Image: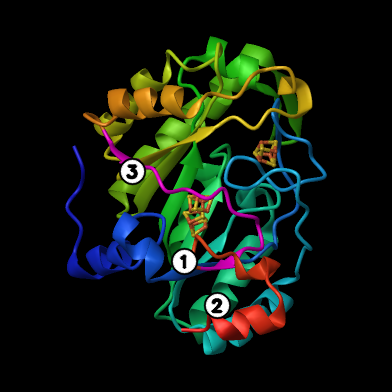
């Protein structure tokens, strides 16, 4: 049930290291860590680290101002022209930080040819969609870990929505409604959607295929099933084995294309997915420069 994309979007997909597995060795991305705040509390998240929904846990990225992010992009794009995607993926939720939009405006004005990408927990997606379109984001990731509020309530402790705290099922219902409505509206607006799902054994493992069926209905382009990294309130849950994750991916594949090459990047990663240059020495960066 995937929408048709025009030539421009097909090119962006073909040059996006996360959306096209063939692109991962050829094209890179830069993440700008401009979004420190978050409006929910996932049970697998330890807040002083990067957002686990799209990032490697246990690391803390240095938060940049929009101007610093622009300067970093200038420098890195000049050095590494194979970087085609600029993403904002934390360290918190990009939609909960106005700096996300200021940054994208700055990048779009100076580098109109780059693909703008973002990852969110989706709580604010319906109300921020207009801003997302205005700044020119064309690939968007929403983390959906359950579409059943009872299951979601086991994964997210609470959400803070329009200044009020909602716990358990009440919060889960608000988040799921906004995620699904937001994804539908974003697909209709022509954004290419990826959904990340964190696989939590004993909590959502049997339910993930139901999510995949829903994604098919909504016209989602690709799904990325990520293994739980057990920390925070979920520190005692065993992460899924590679085989368990593979089986779930296979069960979901008939409904929605599966991404299997995710590297669980840092919120300040850049370069090819397999070579996060933010962690490399200056000499090594020069050596592998393409
Ligand atoms: Fe970044 Fe995410 Fe855009 Fe990619 S990462 S905002 S879609 S440009 Fe990619 Fe990294 Fe996995 Fe994310 S490998 S964690 S899926
Ligand atoms: Fe943590 Fe990300 Fe969940 Fe926010 S959305 S609580 S930053 S994992």
Distance from disc 1 to disc 2, alpha carbons, whole Å, reads 9 Å
- Describe the colour scheme in one phrase: rainbow
The image's mark for residue 116 is 1
Assign the magenta stretch its main secondary structure: loop
Q: Determine the secondary structure under disc 1.
A: strand
Q: Quadrant of ligand 2?
A: top right
Q: Along the horizontal axis of the image, is 149 left or right of 186?
A: right
- Mark 2 residue crowding within 10 angstroms, few (<14) / some (14–19) / many (20+): many
Q: Position of residue 169 (x, y in %)?
A: 62, 13
Residue at 26 percent across and 31 percent down: it is 253
Distance from disc 2 to disc 3, alpha carbons, whole Å, reads 25 Å
Q: Give the number of the mark in front: 1 or 3.
A: 3
Residue at 70 percent across and 82 percent down: it is 282
Q: Determine the secondary structure under disc 2.
A: helix
Residue 10, image quadrant? bottom left
Q: What residue did someone put label 2 on?
A: 107
The magenta segment is 256-271
């Amino acid at each position: 049930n995937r929408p048709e994309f025009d030539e421009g979007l097909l090119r962006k997909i073909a040059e996006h290291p996360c959306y096209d597995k063939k692109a991962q060795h050829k094209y890179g991305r830069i993440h700008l860590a401009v979004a420190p705040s978050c409006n929910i509390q996932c049970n697998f998240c330890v807040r002083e680290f990067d957002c686990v929904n799209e990032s490697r846990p246990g690391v803390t990225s240095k938060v940049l101002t929009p101007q610093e992010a622009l300067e970093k992009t200038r420098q890195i794009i000049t050095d590494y022209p194979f970087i085609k995607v600029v993403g904002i993926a934390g360290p918190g939720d990009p939609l909960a930080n106005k700096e996300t939009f200021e940054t994208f405006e700055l990048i779009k004005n100076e580098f109109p040819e780059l693909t703008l990408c973002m990852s969110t927990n989706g709580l604010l997606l319906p109300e921020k969609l207009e801003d997302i379109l205005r700044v020119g984001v064309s690939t968007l990731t929403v983390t959906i870990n359950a579409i059943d509020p009872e299951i979601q309530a086991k994964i997210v402790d609470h959400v803070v929505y329009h200044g009020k705290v909602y716990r358990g099922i009440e919060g889960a219902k608000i988040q799921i409604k906004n995620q699904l409505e937001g994804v539908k509206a974003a697909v209709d607006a022509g954004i290419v959607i990826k959904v990340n799902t964190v696989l939590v054994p004993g909590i959502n493992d049997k339910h993930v295929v139901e999510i995949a069926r829903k994604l098919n209905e909504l016209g989602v382009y690709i799904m990325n099933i990520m293994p739980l990294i057990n920390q925070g309130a979920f520190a005692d849950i065993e992460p899924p084995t590679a085989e368990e994750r593979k089986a779930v991916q296979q069960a979901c594949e008939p409904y929605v294309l599966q991404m299997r090459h995710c590297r669980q990047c840092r919120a300040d990663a850049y370069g090819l997915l397999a070579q996060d240059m933010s962690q490399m020495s200056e000499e090594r960066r020069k050596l592998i420069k393409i």
